[in-house]
Image: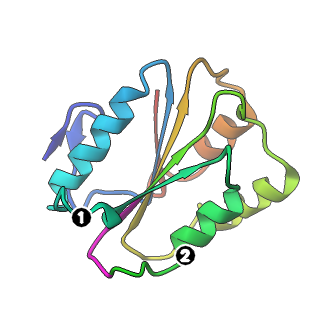
Amino acid sequence: MYSFLLKKEISDKTIVPCYFFWGEEAFLAFQFIQELRESLNLPDDQEHNVERLNLGDQSWMDVIDSARTIPFFISSWRILVVEIPKDKGSNLTATEDKILNDYFPSPPATQTIILIILPGKTRRNSPLLKLFSAFPSSSVCMKE
């Protein structure tokens, strides 16, 4: 399936472990979730394929623990949608920085996709954007 947001074909062979979307048009990231579901043939009626995490209530450690955990309902693919509240911003603690730096350069070979959404205006030199843009494109796809 062709992704208009990424401007390229997405399939089980081209998917990367993490997609990071930021900017004013957050609804495009939610459309991408549907594109992923369609390209991976995930049924709409099985919500256990898409798990939502909010960094207002949870931590990066919770996100990474979820990504490493085998889901209760075994399915071929799982999408973890991580929403970052506007007031949470893009700052990281030293512990969060270490957790992310330990995981993303070489994520485990699972069929879990982490989709991060940072809505609103964000400076390109923010710590979170700088961190994720430093990861290899084979691990993280960044899109404004």
- The answer to whether residue 132 is visible is yes
Taking 89 as reference, is 21 left or right? left
- Specify start and end residues of the magenta stretch as a single range: 74-79
- The answer to whether residue 107 is visible is no
Q: Amino acid type of disc 1?
A: Gln
Q: Residue at x 22, y 45 (%)?
A: 35
Q: Quadrant of residue 44?
A: bottom left
Mark 1 Cα within 10 Å, few/some/many (few <14, many 20+)?
few
State whether residue 139 is above or below residue 24.
below
The location of residue 33, given as percent across then percent down, is: 31, 45
Taking 28 as reference, is 82 left or right? right
The location of residue 23, given as percent across then percent down, is: 51, 23
Circle 1 sits on which residue? 46
Q: Residue at x 69, y 67 (%)?
A: 102
Mark 2 Cα within 10 Å, few/some/many (few <14, many 20+)?
some
Task: Give the main secondary structure, helix, strand or loop, of the magenta stretch.
Answer: loop
The location of residue 97, given as percent across then percent down, is: 77, 53
Tag 1 secondary structure: loop
Q: Quadrant of residue 78?
A: bottom left
Q: How many marks?
A: 2
Q: Residue at x 48, y 18 (%)?
A: 24
Q: What mark, if any, has residue 68 been given in the picture?
A: 2
Q: Nearer the viewer, residue 83 or 135?
A: 83
Q: Amino acid type of disc 2?
A: Arg
Taking 13 as reference, is 90 left or right? right
State whether residue 142 is above or below residue 109.
above
Tag 2 secondary structure: helix
**Farthest residue in the right direction?**
94
The mark lying in front, picked from 1 and 2, is: 1
Q: Residue at x 78, y 37 (%)?
A: 91
